[in-house]
Image: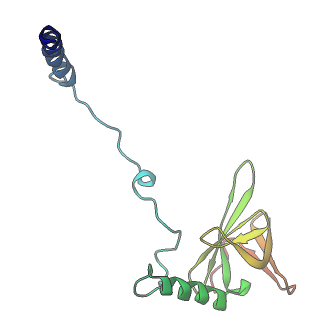
Amino acid sequence: MKIKNTIVFLCLALIAPAAARAQVPAAGVGVSTPALTVEQVYRPANTRDPLKISTVFGDEHSPKSRASVSDLSRSTFSVYNLFLTGIMEDSRSKEAMLADNATGLIYILKGGKLLDSKRKQVPGVSGVIKGKQVVLMTEDKKVQQLNLHETEK
């Protein structure tokens, strides 16, 4: 047992200095890491426009404030308050980003469904993306046409 421990100690004594030398860079050689991009450093939790006035006041993480924010968005939601901020297209589909003038909330139109910021479908609203135009339809047959690059109301 004593011989075995001695052999292990000697092996570690021979390997450790070599490993330490391997980790120290040679003189004149610099080690650098690639610089991070803005997308890698800053990933916002929501897509709210920071230049719009916030509709949430106080502690937004408490249970009662969540209910009040969702009640506010449900009570003031109207397709006539929405404006088209952008259309994105990839090889699979098109998506339109819409913003609510009254609440500042962001909605996404994808696959004919209007989704809120939590990716939940807004009931009773559907839509179609046609070029640089979005047509929204409600259950009660209201139609709202939104054009890209139209001035806000």
Residue 20 visible: yes
Q: In which quarter of the image is residue 10?
A: top left
- Front residue of 139/17: it is 17
Vertical order, 54 against 130 (above or below): below
Q: Which of 40 and 7 is in front in this view?
A: 7
Please name the residue shown 67% across and 81% down the image. 82
Q: Residue furthest bottom?
A: 75
Q: Where is residue 96 in the image (x, y as percent from the top left)?
A: 69, 66
Image quadrant assignment for residue 151: bottom right
Residue 7 picture location, percent across and down = 16, 9
Above/below status of 115 relative to 95: below
In the visual, does 43 lie left or right of 133?
left
Q: Indicate whether 74 appears above or below 132.
A: below
**Count of marks overlaid on the render:** 0
Res. 55 in view: no
Q: Which colour scheme is used?
A: rainbow
Looking at this view, is 148 or 112 the one in front?
112
Residue lying farthest to the front in this orientation: 1
Q: x%, y% of residue 67? A: 55, 85
Quarter of the image that includes the N terminus = top left
Looking at the rendered image, the quarter that the C terminus falls into is bottom right
Residue drawn at 52 percent across, 73 percent down? 48
| Residue at x 59%, y 89% (from the top left corner) | 72
Residue at point 60% right, 88% down? 71
Q: Please identify the quarter of the rendering in which residue 16 is found.
A: top left
Q: Which percent across, then down, holds residue 84?
A: 67, 74
